[in-house]
Image: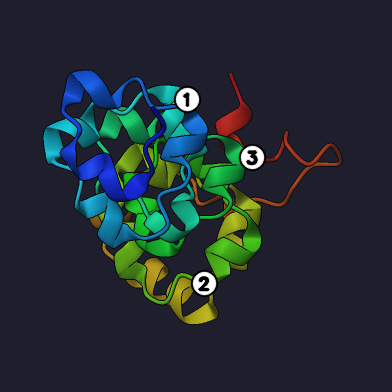
Amino acid sequence: QTIDYTQFQYLGPTTIVHLLPSQAGSIPTIEWLNGIPGDSRAALTEPQIQALNVGVLGLSKLTNRQASFLLSSQIRSLSFLDFPRLLPSQVILLTQLQMAAIPTVGTLLQMSQDSRDAITREQLLSLRPTVRADLNRLPVAAAAPADFVNPILVPPAADGLAGDPRTKP
């Protein structure tokens, strides 16, 4: 028997795992996702998570493990509100347009230090000038580890990478 998203609120953790990814992907709004009990939501599998429209649903109701399942296309659909939930390996997939949408330095400060360190030179340059300025005004300890070299200040090499201190062995 086929069920639709209006019935997901009645599924327990051992049942929800049997939904097809297409069924999970049919959840249209955060309200419907919120209606699924927390333990059942936490049981959603990797293929089910990868079928969700996280550009609409966001990441707030997913576990950290589930957020790690995101496809690059899903990451590129996220709002800046979800950036603090991303792993460093996911942060590098954010587009320049997404980075340009960050309204204040607060979003960056909510990210883990490792995730902030993963931000590329191009991503930093695409931040709003006011956000970049605020980031540069932060005390070094709050903004970066002691050995951090701001990639904005390092001119790129001919290959585009060798000038970035994070690429040196």
Reply above or below: 89 against 112: above
The image quadrant that residue 109 belongs to is: bottom left
Drawn side of residue 17 relative to residue 79, left or right:
left
Circle on res. 101: 2
Closer to the chain start, of discs 3 and 2, is 2
Q: Which residue is mark 3?
A: 164
Reply above or below: 27 against 167: below
Split into 4 quadrants, where in the image is the C terminus? top right
Q: Secondary structure at mark 2?
A: loop
Residue occupying image coordinates x 20% and y 44%: 9
In this orientation, which residue lies closer to the viewer: 114 or 163? 114
Closer to the chain start, of discs 1 and 3, is 1
How many residues crowd around disc 1 within 10 Å: few (fewer than 14), some, or many (20 or more)?
some
In this orientation, which residue lies closer to the viewer: 79 or 57? 57
- Closest to the camera, between mark 1 and mark 3, is 1
CA gap, disc 1 to disc 3?
36 Å
Q: Which residue is mark 1?
A: 47
Q: Secondary structure at mark 3?
A: loop
Residue occupying image coordinates x 62% and y 52%: 121
